[in-house]
Amino acid sequence: MAVAAPSVAGSSARPSGRMARHPWLSAAWAAARTPRGAVGLSLTSAVVLIAVIGPFVAPNSPDALLTLTNAKPSGQFPLGSDFLGRDVLSRVLDGGWALLLMAALATAFGIIAGAGAGISAAYLRGRPDGFIMRTVDVILAFPQLVFALLLVSVLGPRLWLIVLAVGLSHAPQVARVIRSATLDISERDYVKVAELQGMRPRKIMSSEILPNLVSPLTVEAGLRLTYSIIIMAGLSFLGFGQQPPAANWGLMINENRNGLPLNPWAVIVPVALIALLTIGTNTFTDAFARVAIGIDRRPEESALIDELTPGAPR
Amino acid sequence: MMPRGAAGSAAPHGSADDIRLDVIDLEIRIGQSGADVVSEISLAVAAGEVLGLVGESGSGKTTVALALLGHARRGLRITAGEVRLDGVNLLALQPAELRAARGARVSYVPQDPSVALNPTLRVGAQVAEALRVHPGVVDDPAGRALEVMREARLDATPDLMRRYPHQLSGGQQQRVALAMAFCCRPSLIVLDEPTTGLDVSTQRHVLDTVRSLCRSYGVAAVYVSHDLAVVSGLVSQVAVMYAGRIVEIGPTAKVFADPIHPYTRRLLAAVPSPDRAEILTGIEGQPPRPGRRGAGCSFAPRCEFAIEQCRLAPPEPTPIDGRAVRCIRAAEIRAHPVPRQAIARGQAGTGQAAVLSLRSVSARYGRRPVLSGVNFEVPPESCIAVVGESGSGKTTLARCIVGLHTGWTGEIAFGGARLHPGIRGRSKDTLRRVQYIFQNPYASLNPRKTVGQIVAQPLEELLGLSFSERSERAASALADVSLSAEFLNRFPDQLSGGERQRVAIARALVVEPDLLICDEVTSALDVSVQAVIVEQLRRLQRERHLAMIFITHNLALVRSIADAAVVLRDGEVVESGPVDQVLEHPKDPYTAALIKDVPALASRRE
């Protein structure tokens, strides 16, 4: 059911045509249809939706000082006000997109750098392997948040630097996972076939090995996205992210924690949104990993059973 | 029931009294009410008798074998029928009773002992464990363990008992698995292709062990195999399965000497003979999968004798000559002789300069020498078979020639020029002219590329052709291996094993090489598919005037395809010469032993 074999269209002779199907897309679709995946996906998309359309539907300006400080919720301000008297609802609606965007970019950067390092180390072996993996070991010696903090405090709290720093702090972990997956794949016969055709190492890595790493990479990306969100929020909380008066969920938690007894919603809502988002991405990634592993290691027999009993639970 | 009655009366040894295993109308479906995987399976095995269950992969033979232990794989369910062992229906037992019966009264020998044995348990503990979980079945467990190891022809020294499975050879591992299966003196043993992964000589020794154990224990045994030749010397009754049903069941001698069902006939025609060079006729197409089986006879789409009536209703088993055959035209078909066609071998390429010549080639992996002083030549337009057991250095030899293994000394000359040891030191033209086909088609095709991309890839890398030229030549290369252009957009996981290997052949031939190296290219395939592939290779080699090196452990295949043979033993050439000479008058005792160990169809040895 996961990889529905598409009927092969006619006899159109397009040998080097585009891929007729994307196994990881259909795997993601299959994951979304499992209970676990459905929960994860709906949580994630709900929070993403809030962050994306929030700025357009916010009733007030996020920066305007409108009422008393730390005011309780009222008809006009459903979530009350923050420590400067700004509308919490508007700030919540406005404060997600930057966090999400930065987390996504950092994840993408971390995955690309980590996968590049991992594949090269595993395929080239020898000196490149030693150099890359020892570097990775050194970076891994630091806790991830500490490493990101170190980079940010040295380089300064510019947003693109934060993205790079968080991405870089992911790269070693990704490199380790991808290296071990690549070690297995580089011994496969189809890689030897490509070598026998005189293919260059760079092309072997990109066209023979990389496409076979899509499942572990997707799983890794989901996991790293979860961490990125936490680290980004954490950095904001510690004052290294967006600077005031910008609205940002992480920053809001820090700013309003003194007003917690007066208007707890200014803290609880951003905390809840970050928590739901990370739970959502993590749950969906977990569902995807289960499906992807099932596909990668699927014996023909169970493929047959899946195909003949649509909708059967795995 | 008709089928059982027919089969039961057909069994030469089986009087009604000593029937140990009696399977009645077994049916297994997918899920609750899904398609049937196997159905109407009825067979009976008497004490001391071995029944062979044969068929192509996907015929349902392993599914039936597991059902004999009351087990159905995940997603499958035994929906009807009985498996009576000494009169007790295993399928009606409670889970606890079934667990007590498994291992003690019915035991199983799996296909691959290297994964069936627990790698963390010592051999002695492994065998003792089987006895420990069934306390009271034997009196003296420790003594029994030693006894059964000796019976399985293992030298049960304390040293061996202390070893771990990975420290044993494949043959020894399989003997340990046999010892575990026999240690509780079961009534029934199910053997699921226990010799498939083994060398011919190891296979023969394991088969001898199985034979003597079955005989001395008076056990009923079911031997599952896709290889008719293996079964022919061992079993007294054979059941041929096709698409989940038994299409022919009867005494081995009769079935093999005079097959009636068209499928049995085709299967037998696909088995290579070590004694004669014959054109192998494989079976094109694939068996229909569960849920896709039509109303009529499942074999009708592939059957040369099929008539309109065959497609209407599934044939019932008909008793003929002591057998039960599911074919409505059985009587008419029997009159047709099974076609066998000898090959007229031309004298190829004598007196011309060799395409490839090896002079004192030695290779090592690390410190371990794998090849030492190998010399031979491949004349133009000829096929040289390289034979030997696993570990004899066949694959290393091929990898040295193509450049995948660089740790060798000596001289390999191709087309008169010395070959550089590594791929990087060779020109694109040299890479193009020497093509290598890997053993396992499941590993040699990139699962993320379409067949079209796979076949066109060498054209881009080695010849730098344009997109349209690549498309054209890829399509025609597929046509050469009888695959239609529809396959261009398919992915490897949509292909059967035979189709995959054809794609690999097309990929090698699309660049028009001068030398083709085939490394055990049929060892992962069914016998019926192997015949198709070998015939295709033979035809293409002739048509394209290719020089070819055909590496195999199967001496029977050598007859059908090669002009000359080189026999390797522990990295040394012990014998070489024209095929007929090597196979009929072997000079080296090793070659003679190899030839003796090749399983052959009993009927042909008469």
Image (cartoon, grey):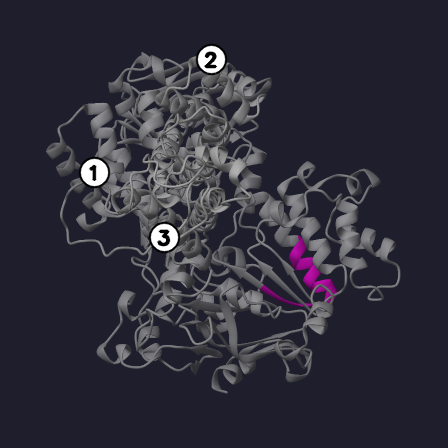
Range of the magenta residues? B209-222
Name the amino acid, label 2: Val
Q: What amino acid type should be assigned to the residue bearing mark 1?
A: Glu
Q: Which mark is residue A154?
A: 2
Of residues B417 and A232, the one drawn nearer to the viewer in this rendering: A232
* Residue at (44, 62) in percent of width and height: B55
Residue under mark 2: which chain is it in? A
Regarding mark 2 in the picture, which secondary structure is present there? helix
Tell me where residue A42 appears, x and y as whole percent. 39, 54
Q: Quadrant of residue A274?
A: top left
Three-letter amino acid code at the position of disc 3:
Val
The residue under the point 38% across, 47% down is: A47
Residue A129, above or below B279: above
Tell me the tag on residue B543.
1
Instruction: Give me the chain letter of mark 3.
Output: B
The residue drawn where x is 39% and y is 82% is B316
Where is residue B271? Give x, y as percent: 41, 54
- Identify the disc placed on residue B529: 3
